[in-house]
Amino acid sequence: MSDNRAAPEAAEAASAAPAASAGEADLTGTGTAASPGAAPGQGNRILREIMSGNALVSVLAVVVALVIGGLLIAVTDERVGAAAGYFFARPGDLFGALWASVSEAYGALVRGATYDPTARTWLGQLGIFETLTIATPLILAGLAVTIAFRAGLFNIGAQGQIILGASFSAAVGFGWNLPPVLHLLAVILAGAVGGAIWGGIAGVLKARTGAHEVIVTIMLNYIAINLIGYLLKSPLKDPNSSNPVSPALHDSAVFPLLLGPNFRLHAGFLLAVLAVIAVAWLLNRSTLGFELRAIGANPSAARTAGMVVSRGYIIVMLIAGALSGLAGVAQVAGTEKSLDAEVAGSIGFDAITVALLGRSTPWGTFFAALLFGAFKAGGTSMAVNANVSIDIVLVVQSLIVLFIAAPPLIRAIFRLKSASSRGAAA
Amino acid sequence: MKNSLLSATKRGATVGAVTLGATALLLSGCGAAPSTSSNSGSASAGAGNYLGCIVSDAGGFDDQSFNQSSYEGLKKTETDLGIKVKQAESSTKADFEPNLNQMSNAGCNLTFTVGFLLKDATEKVAKTAPNSHFAIIDDNTIDLPNVKPVVYDTAQAAFLAGYAAAAQTKTGKVGTFGGINIPTVTIFMDGFADGVKYYNDKKGKSVQLLGWDKDTQQGVFTNTFDVVQEGTKATNNLLGDGADVIMPVAGPLGKGAGDAILDANKNGKDAKLIWVDSDGYLTAPAYKSVLLTSVIKKMGEAVETIVKDDKNGSFSSTPYVGTLENDGVALAPFHDLDASVSADTKSELQTIQKSIISGDLKVESAASPK
């Protein structure tokens, strides 16, 4: 993987040569960020460092976040509080209580996300499949953030793109009557098109007018949220329901279940895996992918090398939008089977974290999405069985973002060397 | 590298433990240890093998609205009936089914699902777990032997509030706004509208209702249950149009409405607030001074009754419909503003309540439970 990335990075290094020496000398990285006369490219460079930091930082960020989450679980536990009250009389109790509370909570989390022999249903016993189910849209949306980032665009608009993709696929799913396999394909295609339109708008605006994609995609999120609210009031609303939901998709339009009716895992997961392989191929093996990475590394250098940067922006946002749209399809045709205003949940934003944690590589994103799926699947089990609020999962996820966004912090905690010695660390 | 990493991890963990220990030490480490060694803290309730569970909708159990009151009702049975309670909060629709499945796994005897949005998930999981009982709040569309629908004919209580508001207005205009145009919201507004209309017919007055048209089912909606400032904005608009009694039907946005009214009254207006779902005098005491009354849905009581019945083996899938008659919905007392409401109005409200209960006076809303 690092071989494939070498070319664009070389381009970057060449252009950033004057700044590079200063940056490398400063091991903590704080000086670079704080320097008052930072060049406009500096922000992007820092962002890029965050997005493509080494795998060790990702892993350690998760570990530190889990440790802090554990402390939060412990200090909010009544038993720990009680044992702390007589710490001097019997100090062992405090540590026993600490251990009990954290191990119960994380134990329930891990069992819920993987295998729990005590559960009463198949679905509960084999939580691993629930993990995969929840990870499915996250993988797809995470890829949408990843691929855009590799072309130097920060795609905050996965949320809106998911909503559009979900709306399009739902409309086809309950509105059309097609033979079984064809119908599902039409639903998938419609979702990809819907998402691609929304992503494409941001791409065109960026390419033609230079409008910053972060602003544009955030605003498009709002438009999408209100658009779906409108759509669910009349055109897509189920006439038999007084609530803002669409009719259920036809049976021919939903993903088949992979493991029978006892589990929610559906064929959308296979689609997600295919998408990972496709994006990995696109980025690392194709000419287009090379162009996108070159543009991401340094647009000016790419332009000088004869690449059409604006075309690259449009194409990558179309692809990113289509991937997010597929995440919407995974929701609508996979687990939800009808459209509602909450269809995107927090997937569009979790996707950003997933892409960050996956260091914006396709397989990194895949495993990060699995981890988040496990957090979610295990989190409900933790909430119910260990009586720890699922919000702690949100805290852990947020801490992960925090630590990934501050690689120097992680490096300082663990006394790691800076990103410049990446090869040695990996 | 690996070794240094390991030691670094250890160091981190030690630092954490030491910090925590030191905190405990500073705070209150000097108490006496309990004499008994059985301090495990598991299952203090004696008889409790019965498991009552609850799954929230996206509002969470701290929404100062139906999730919270249902949850508190269930928590109360934990102590009153000695049952065990498990809860799971949902943050989006996609959480409903996993949460319910967890409850199924945990072996819940009775699971409450709060909100009509949980209908599909409840129906699906109830089918797969025919031996467990479920009760869904604010939905009356599931027809399964192990699901009890819990609904409220809120329009009846809102009718009383509308009448009281019309009687109290000095500007001849009262107002309301909703969070989202959905039945559980509009049922309040329909009842309120009818109450105002009834007052006008009886008294030959022409009190105007702003923010809701019952005939077209259109009105002022903030399109959010989260952004409190939107409540302030909507209320300021209504106040600006001359309304002086406002009923926000938007959960937490009621606080925004209360702020707007307190503010307006500081600048010489004399506006009043009508709270919904719970008695605002108790749940939102900041607005006591402007709180005329509240339209209450008594979720907690219904939850307690259903748990009690199920525990005694008399669960039924017949819907529970909260009405004025069974005290499932009610108009709260006027509290601090009691003196400002005339004795005539109070007795008229009594009479109306009686005729609604007897069926002489029909309060109808498109959103009423059928």
Image (cartoon, rainbow, N blue to C red):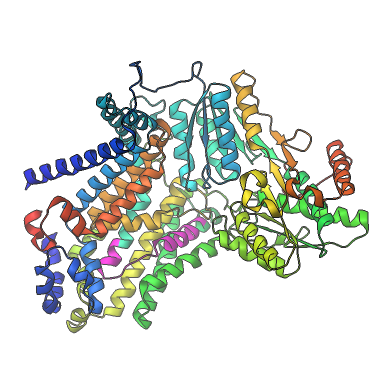
| Total numbered circles | 0
Q: Can residue A293 be seen in this view?
A: no
Task: Find residue A317 and report its horizontal and vertical position in percent.
Answer: 34, 69
Vertical placement of residue B265 versus B285, above or below: below
In this rendering, position of residue A260 left or right of residue B183? left
In depth, the one of B248 and A317 nearer the eye is B248
Residue plotted at (44% across, 51% down): A331
Residue plotted at (43% across, 56% down): A328
Residue plotted at (93% across, 59% down): B204
Vertical placement of residue A386 versus B229, above or below: above
Q: Is residue A173 visible?
A: yes
User: Image quadrant of residue A150?
Assistant: bottom left
Vertical placement of residue B240 versus B222, above or below: below
Read off the magenta span: A146-170
Task: Find residue A22 and report its horizontal and vertical position in percent.
Answer: 11, 73
Quadrant where the image shows the N terminus of chain A: bottom left
Taking the magenta stretch, the answer to whether it contains residue B83 is: no
User: Image quadrant of residue A207?
Assistant: bottom left
Task: Find residue A102 and report its horizontal and vertical position in percent.
Answer: 30, 34
In depth, the one of B231 and A31 nearer the eye is A31
User: Image quadrant of residue A313?
Assistant: bottom left
Taking the magenta stretch, the answer to whether it contains residue A166 is: yes
Residue plotted at (37% across, 43% down): A392
In this rendering, position of residue B208 left or right of residue A77? right
Magenta region, main secondary structure: helix
